[in-house]
Image: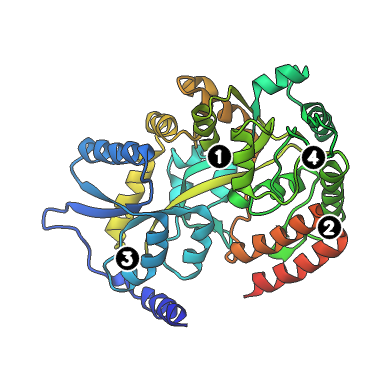
Amino acid sequence: MATLAVAVTATAALAGCSTSSSSTDSNGHIDLTFWHGYTEADGKVLDGIVDDYNKSQDKVTIKTQVKTWDVIDDTLLTALSANKGPQIVAMPAERLPVYASKKALVNLDDFYADDKNAAEISEQAAAMETVDGAKYGVPTGFVPLSVFYNKALFEAAGVTEFPETWDEWVDAAKKLTVDQDGDGTPEQYGLALADHATVGNGVWPSLFAGNGGEIVDDSKSVIDSPENVETLEYWSKALNDDKISPTGLDGVATDKLFSSGKAAMTIGGPWMASVSTENKIDYGIAAIPAGPVAQASSGIGVSMAVTAQASTEEQKAAQDFFSYFFSKDVATEWSLGSGWPPLRTDVAAADVSSNPVVASLTDISSTTKALLPGVINSTDVLSAMDEATQKAMAGGDPKELLGSASTAIEKALKD
């Protein structure tokens, strides 16, 4: 209750943030504070880009403050209401609709309409920044979930081509599943498929989309569609009858199963490259195979926004930095440094070939879809989905489970 009271008070106070005093000095120089949660090597690359921007002109100085994503989430509203927050902030993309709904962020539609570099941002990455038809942020990361596979296990099983469709995927997984003692519990699985708490919560939305299904459409739940029922029936059979993957796995467990060499394939993000290397796995990266309707993958994203604390002059300065960030050379530098595919559509895999992981992800990035763009209460929406997928893979009735999930999602969308 105390947390709720703070949030309500902070939200009310934000209405006056636009009248906050500007950091412009008597010479017209503007200082901006930028909070971000990039705490690893990518953070050093981002700070380097900021330093280069500061040196490229003499009107604006951006000072970065590195915090964990949780700390940013816990303190942003309170800091803004006290006029002690940042003018620029980065956050996991699913949090952007929350802050936009609380009037903590500035509408950036004019930036997208007028800036030549913003015009090159990929459509789905930009969709991730859209709330109620308006854009409140820009992407700093947008990466498709992909399949990481063990090349040595593929070779041993005689699987020479990576599958392109669901049926081919399941057939390959059967060949890669090994039950040496015939006890019904394989020593090696063809696939480690999480049925709940999946990486970025994007595995099942990817599979639903592959069969033409969605979770939310036009602010209404559509998770209980016949297409989604069919998807759960298909994968329940593959896991329970063909035993190509254990049931009951979450995202962490699938990573462990793959990194231990006990699963030939898993769905993950770019960090699985380093995990595989650390565990001496010769890996490949491929797009999630196409379902009956489409080839699709949910994107994991990070957003960057201008806060309501920024004055008009500060907003213009922040947008000038955004334009610099999305210039082709800088966008390429950031892609290589962050390990995520380029955010501009005109940066090709060949442009980032010095990083094979980034190049592979760039090749398949056209399959990426924004996950629940603009949905404010996405956490509860995905929790309802999680319960349905886990119980369905455990043998529950998909139609009944998705019906219950739809009821819970409708409630979450209205809250």
Mark 3: amino acid: Gln
Q: Which of marks 2 and 1 is nearer the N terminus?
A: 1
Q: From the viewer's side, name the closer residue of 5 and 150.
A: 150
Task: Examine the image and state in which quarter residue 211 appears.
Answer: top right
Residue closer to the observer: 266 or 300: 266
Q: Residue 174 carries which label?
A: none
The x and y percentages for residue 364 are 63, 30
CA gap between label 1 and label 3 equals 30 Å
Q: Pointer 4 and pointer 1: residues touching (CB < 8 Å)?
A: no
Q: Is residue 13 left or right of residue 289?
A: left
Specify the label residue 225 is tagged with. 2
Q: In the image, residue 2 lies at what x, y percent?
A: 43, 82
- Per the model, the C-alpha gap separating discs 2 and 1 is 27 Å
Residue occupied by mark 3? 309
Q: Name the residue under label 4.
A: 185
Q: Which of marks 2 and 3 is in front?
A: 2
Residue, disc 1: 143
Amino acid type for the residue under numbered disc 4: Thr
Badge 4: few (under 14), some or many (20 or more) residues near its Cα, within 10 Å? some
